[in-house]
Image (tube, helix red, strand yellow):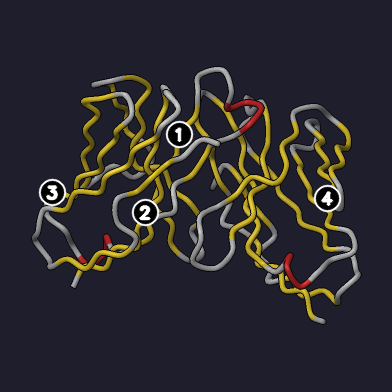
Amino acid sequence: QKEVEQNSGPLSVPEGAIASLNCTYSDRGSQSFFWYRQYSGKSPELIMFIYSNGDKEDGRFTAQLNKASQYVSLLIRDSQPSDSATYLCAGYNDYKLSFGAGTTVTVRA
Amino acid sequence: DVKVTQSSRYLVKRTGEKVFLECVQDMDHENMFWYRQDPGLGLRLIYFSYDVKMKEKGDIPEGYSVSREKKERFSLILESASTNQTSMYLCASHKVGSAMDYGYTFGSGTRLTVV
């Protein structure tokens, strides 16, 4: 079993809608969690990190963490075509990031 | 901004060749990492280094080795390239004490094709 599992997708949402991405993790020692966005053929870029239970908002992005349920999510509000990408969830522990396989999001105009 | 530079964007090598992938970072980061990325499998850690000449195996080290002779440079070596090593290779770095808050900084990746 992978340490970090993401909902497999692909996810297609209309422009202006909310995209909801989910991630579960098995390592209870994971201290913080990251969401990376990766455009096709490019390297991952960090968009959000969270280490406390609850919600964290940054512009159109909201990350949610529930350590009791070992669950992390990312909401993208008012989705734009430029949000079309693969989103990677990662958990950090012992100097290392463990990544999920990614969820591909397509925002249709 | 931290820069992580990978020497080649695309490489084509023959089966059995020895292949060197180079990664250089310019912000005095202690920790450096090599991942490979394959469709449906995500990023998998090959090796990482937390100091000069120090290295640790990741999840999939077989067929690879690494070298870190200087703090800013971390090399991935494919001793005898095989077709199943065709992949996107990503280098990353971070400063000790910072990753928990800020994650890694990635290089632009090297797409290696072994024929």
Q: Amino acid at mark 3?
A: Glu
In whole angstroms, how far apart are the C-alphas of marks 1 and 2? 14 Å
Residue at 74%, 28% (x, y): give it. A51
Q: Amino acid at mark 2?
A: Tyr
Label 1 neighbour load within 10 Å: few <14, some 14-19, many 20+: many
Q: Are marks 1 and 2 on the same chain?
A: yes
Task: Say which residue label 4 marks.
Answer: A61
Determine the chain carrying the residue at label 3.
Answer: B
Q: Is residue A45 left or right of residue A67?
A: left
Q: Residue at x 59, y 58 (%)?
A: A38
Q: Which residue is mark 3?
A: B79
Q: Residue at x 51, y 64 (%)?
A: B40
Q: Earlier in the sequence, mark 3 or mark 1?
A: 3
Q: Amino acid at mark 1?
A: Ser
Decide if residue B89 is in sight here: yes
x and y percentages locating residue A24 in the rendered image: 70, 45
Give the Cα distance between marks 3 and 4: 43 Å
Foreground mark, 3 or 1, reads: 1
Query: For the residue carrying disc 3, how many other residues have a C-alpha within 10 Å: few (<14), some (14-19), or many (20+)?
Result: some
In terms of depth relative to the viewer, which is nearer, B115 or A81?
A: A81
Q: Say what secondary structure mark 1 lies in.
A: strand
Task: Pinpoint the chain carrying mark 4.
Answer: A
Whole-percent x and y of residue A92?
59, 31
Labels 3 and 4 share a subunit:
no
Q: Which residue position is annotated with label 2?
A: B89
Q: Dot 3: what SS? A: loop
> How far across and how far down the image is residue A4, in percent?
61, 45
- Residue A15: percent from left, percent from top: 86, 74
Q: Residues within 10 Å of mark 4 (few under 14, many from 20)?
A: some
Callout 2: SS: strand
